Structure formats: C-alpha cells, structure tokens
Amino acid sequence: MAFCGFRQIMTRNILDESQIHPAIRETVANHQSDIIREVQAAITSHDVVVVGMKQNPFPKKARKALDTTGLPYQYLEYGSYFNGWRRRNALKMWTGWPTFPMVFVKGVLVGGAADLARLIASGELKRMLSGGSASSPS
Ligand SMILES: N[C@@H](CCC(=O)N[C@@H](CS)C(=O)NCC(=O)O)C(=O)O
C-alpha cells in the first residue's frame, strides 16, 4: 500500500510465540508439518505450482487457464470436500490464504484462480517467470 510516497508493509496477524504456552509449542510447530514441507519443496523446485483439491471447480479453472498459456506447472492435490480438510487447513494457516487453489509463482503466493487469471491477462505472470518482480498495488 503506498501512502505519500512511502510503501507500507502489511503484515498479517500471527499469534506471537510468547503468547503460546511452552507446553503446546511443539504441537503447534509440528502440526501437519509434512504437508507444508511437501508444498515448500514443490514451490522450490517448480516455477508454477497449483495446490488444489478434488471436486472444487476453482483449481480446475486455474489449471485450465495455465493450460491455455502452455506454461508448465506442478499440480498438488489434497483430498476433496469429503476428506482431507485438516491437512488443507494447515496450508491455510501457513499461507493465510483462505481457499483453494493456492497458486505459487517462483515461490510467491499469487492467490487463487481469479488472481492467476488477472496475472495472465495483464502479462505479469510471464514477467514474473522471466525474472521480473511481482508488482504491488499502488
Ligand atoms: N476467488 C477464489 C475462490 C476459490 C474458492 O472459493 N474456493 C472454495 C471453493 S468451494 C474452497 O476452496 N473451498 C474449500 C475450502 O475452503 O477448504 C479463486 O478464484 O480461487
């Protein structure tokens, strides 16, 4: 967010470690950490990663949009509306993004299907992939 020429960094609210009782810190730290590590590994080794789930039409939209660009991407799928919500919830807590898909470009969370469509339409996706940095809203 720009204000009088200064860029303000927005941070999201995360409960401070000091406000978590020591007895439960390990539980909090390790909660579903395998799924998070899996996504971290994917976004490190692939330029474009779509994290989705079965039945949900939005991951399908994201994949279709990417298919039209011809750009390669990695797709990870976790469960469906009938299962896997606890694991997916860990991804939501990690990213702060509330829905699926979660789309990552060069390790950066760009949002969901609608956000991806905007990046494709504006040409920013290709710019990001060719080394340009992600633009911020002014
Ligand atoms: N604006 C988002 C919409 C995505 C969305 O609403 N996803 C819902 C579809 S029902 C979802 O992920 N629901 C399952 C959940 O929240 O775990 C996008 O374009 O990706």
Image (cartoon, grey):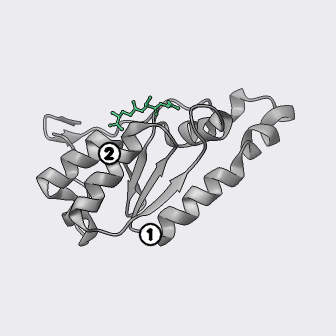
Badge 1 is on which residue?
Answer: 46
Label 2 CB less than 8 angstroms from ligand 1: yes
Taking depth in this image into account, of 47 and 79 the one nearest to the observer is 79
Mark sitting earlier along the chain (2/1): 1
| Residue type at tag 1 | His
Q: Indicate the position of residue 57 as horizontal and vertical percent values.
A: 39, 38
Circle 2 residues within 10 Å: few <14, some 14–19, many ≥20: some
Is 19 left or right of 136, judged from the image as shown? right
Q: CA distance from mark 2 to mark 1?
A: 20 Å
Q: Place residue 25 in its image quadrant.
A: top right
Q: Amino acid at mark 2?
A: Lys
Up-down relation of residue 43 to residue 26 (above or below): below
Write down which quadrant ligand 1 falls in.
top left
Residue 27 x, y percent position in the rendering: 80, 39
Q: Residue furthest front?
A: 55
Which residue is pictured at 30% across the width and 53% down the height?
64
Number of numbered discs overlaid on the protein picture: 2
Left or right of 14 in this view: 119: left
Tag 2 and tag 1, C-beta contact below 8 Å: no
Residue 93 got which mark?
A: none
Which x, y percent locates residue 50? Answer: 43, 54
Identify which residue is drawn at 26% across, 71% down.
Answer: 131
